[in-house]
């Protein structure tokens, strides 16, 4: 009879294991590397005066503004706008990415499309919408929904932490400030919920890591 305890370092999906902390660390480094790229884009926009916001932003219900669905998350109105998005993007993105690279990429794509198309269909046609806020709210939706569909207390804990730090920003899904695209926030959150359901990790009854018990072989 042999006892199989799982992969070295433990299961990266289980809180407290060495593999879990390693996945969080790698995800944090990766997300920290994304933010300088956004600052570089904003610096080029300001320094060269090429008005990337107009060229790559979402212009609701205008065909020539439809490409902004893909490009607008990389653009920001100014550095203050980018600063305000940087920390929650790193924080939430880290925990979404830690669950797996492919799930992260597919989830991000769904969030970008749902958020961007929602803005394009419902936003003011006299506006240009830019910013990563839709993606941020999408990641929040992913973590919250994973906590439900995957019965993950860890995801609930992360959402609680984010709620304590940035709970006031959740009001961004409501039409409060005309200079803020509440549509992008709302549809981003919806996109996150959809992504978490589509790419959920299904629990398998005979999976020893999900059950927290070893596999015994006779």
Image (cartoon, helix red, strand yellow):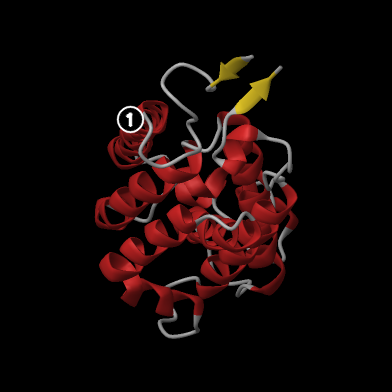
Q: Is residue 54 left or right of residue 163?
A: right
- Residue 168: quarter of image: bottom left
Q: Quadrant of the C terminus?
A: top right
Residue 7, compared with residue 155, is above or below; it is: above
Image quadrant of residue 169?
bottom left
Q: Is residue 181 left or right of residue 83?
A: right
Of the pair 176 and 216, the residue shown nearer to us:
216
Query: Where is residue 119 drawn, in percent x and y?
Result: 63, 66
Residue 132 in sight here: no
Mark 1 Cα-neighbour bin, 10 Å: few <14, some 14–19, many ≥20: some
The answer to whether residue 31 is above or below residue 73 is above
Using the image as rendered, state which of residue 175 and residue 191 is in the foreground.
Answer: 191
Asked if residue 30 lies left or right of residue 138, the reply is: left
Would residue 105 appear left or right of 76 to someone viewing this image? right
* Residue 76 placement (x, y as % from top left): 39, 51
Residue carrying label 1: 25
Residue 217 position (above or below residue 176): above
* Secondary structure found at label 1: helix
Which one is in front, 54 or 164?
164
Q: Quadrant of residue 44?
A: top left
Can residue 128 be seen from the camera position used here? Answer: yes
Q: Nearer the viewer, residue 52 or 92?
A: 92
């Amino acid at each position: 009879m042999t006892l199989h305890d799982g992969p070295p370092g433990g299961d990266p999906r289980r809180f407290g294991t060495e593999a879990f902390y390693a996945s969080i660390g790698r995800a944090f480094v990766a997300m920290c590397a994304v933010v300088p790229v956004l600052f570089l884009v904003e610096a080029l926009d300001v320094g060269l005066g090429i008005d990337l916001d107009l060229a790559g932003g979402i212009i609701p219900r205008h065909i020539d503004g439809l490409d902004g669905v893909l490009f607008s998350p990389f653009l920001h109105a100014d550095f203050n706008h980018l600063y305000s998005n940087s920390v929650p993007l790193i924080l939430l993105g880290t925990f979404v990415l830690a669950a797996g690279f492919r799930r992260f990429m597919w989830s991000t794509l769904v969030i970008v499309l749902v958020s961007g198309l929602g803005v394009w269909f419902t936003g003011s046609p006299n506006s240009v919408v830019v910013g990563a806020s839709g993606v941020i709210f999408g990641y929040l939706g992913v973590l919250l929904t994973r906590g439900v569909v995957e019965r993950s207390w860890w995801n609930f804990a992360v959402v609680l932490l984010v709620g304590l730090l940035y709970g006031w920003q959740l009001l961004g899904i409501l039409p409060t400030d005309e200079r803020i695209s509440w549509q992008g926030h709302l549809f981003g959150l919806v996109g996150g919920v959809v992504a978490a359901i589509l790419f959920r990790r299904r629990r398998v009854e005979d999976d020893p890591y999900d059950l927290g018990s070893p596999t015994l072989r006779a």
